[in-house]
Amino acid sequence: MDHQVEAPPSDPRRRVPRTDALLRDPRLREAAARLGEAPVKSAVRQAQERARRGAVAPEEVADTAVALLPRTAGGLRPVLNATGVLLHTNLGRAPLSAAARRAVAEAAGPTDVELDLTTGVRARRGRTALAALRERVPSAEAAHVVNNGAAALVLAATALAAGREIIVGRGELVEIGDGFRLPDLLVSTGARLREVGTTNRTTPADYAAAVGERTAFVLKVHPSNFRITGFTRAADITELVPLGVPVVVDIGSGLLAPHPLLPGEPDAETQLRAGAALVTASGDKLLGGPQCGLLLGAQDVVGTLARHPLARALRVDKLTLAALEATLTGPGTPTGEALTADPARLRQRAERIARALGADGVDVRAVDSEATVGGGGAPGVRLPSAALSLPERYAAALRAGADPVVGRLAGGRCLLDLRTVPEADDERLAAAVRSAAGR
């Protein structure tokens, strides 16, 4: 029979506080009310185990447990995006504005999402968000919102083209990420794809030759995550509208109006003015809002989509509607601010932070950098930026820190690009670097 060997009286493990005593610590009681008992007990057990191994002193167990507590009850950890990729898919794409975050918090409780408070009867879901969307895109007669950009295209194909043909240029049959390919997505709706043209050249005549009685619509897809250069030709919207069938345009990036820094990026307003019957886009890209799919266009087309049974399965929740409306009506978004940041100001910030960290003994220097839009938007567009350059080993240490920072590796160095770091977070970034350096 096995017997547990007790620690000798002088063993410091005897001084490790009991669990019930630790849970009476006011900080841990507060955390239990905020996070739940399970994560608090887990943090206590981890801290006790560290003390038993001699990693921390018994007197430090409570402090260690507090430090191990998660910031929220959810599993997602906030990070500082210092990659220089404005819309980093792995980091959740567009960070919400302060106005959108407040709107989400307000909408977390009971709301009038489907209730008219004046009459007390049911009202249209998301009516104020849809009105805000139409106001930002005046050429849209109607608008609808689903849960992501791919869902917007699926709804359009299902409602308008099931059992019929969608004409699409071969150079626009893209893969949208994580192995999902546009042809597979569209065929899954019951529609048949009619491919026209070649990879690099598709003319209006190619589309015209394919139009027939089974044609549901012509689809134009912006190849937002790659570019084809050289001997190329793509039909313009104005060349396709005269074909006599609806033209659906998937602009992808969520740009609602032209942007001077992104002349090659299509926008919803321009496409609708040119005659598109429907434009689909993502809300969490250049718009800078929550993940959702936007459908903008003619009243009869959007109405058909909104009434289709699939629309119920793809609808967004009240939190998304709140964040979307605040993004549309509120002040500028972090994405917009990062896109238009002054390179000279970014360099000044980098030099200031580098001087402060250098004074603490950190091997760091300010360097010029190039940022990108990312998120499948504006391929080839390079945004001049500035970064902190650190030894390569910092990359892993920063990701593993209490306040994680994600940078990028280049030339054997870890770069922290400031175009994607709000200026208000400069000291937070510096503190994370000091922690990773052991300062």
Image (spheres, rainbow, N blue to C red):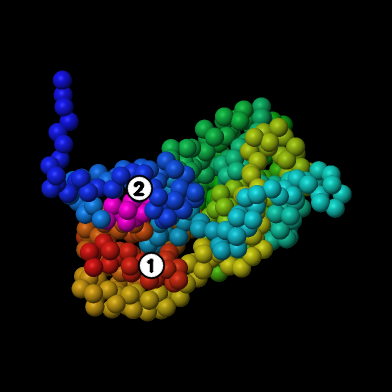
Depth check: 150 or 381 in front?
A: 150
Magenta span has 62? yes
Foreground mark, 2 or 1? 2
Q: Amino acid at mark 2?
A: Ala
Disc 2 packing (10 Å; few <14; some 14–19; many ≥20): few
What x and y, as percent, mark residue 372?
42, 61
Judge by depth and name the residue closer to the eye, 60 or 80. 60
From the top left corner, tell me how far across and down residue 426 is, in percent: 39, 71
Q: Is residue 365 left or right of residue 222?
A: left
Q: Residues within 10 Å of mark 1 (few under 14, many from 20)?
A: some
Q: Which residue is mark 1?
A: 428
Farthest residue, direction top:
1
Q: Quadrant of residue 362?
A: bottom left
- Whichever of callouts 2 and 1 sits on the residue coming sooner in the sequence is 2
Rendering coords of residue 28 (x, y %) = 41, 52
Q: Quadrant of the N terminus?
A: top left
User: Which residue lies under the disc numbered 2?
Assistant: 21
Q: Residues in magenta? A: 60-72
| Residue 400 versus residue 173 in the image, above or below | below
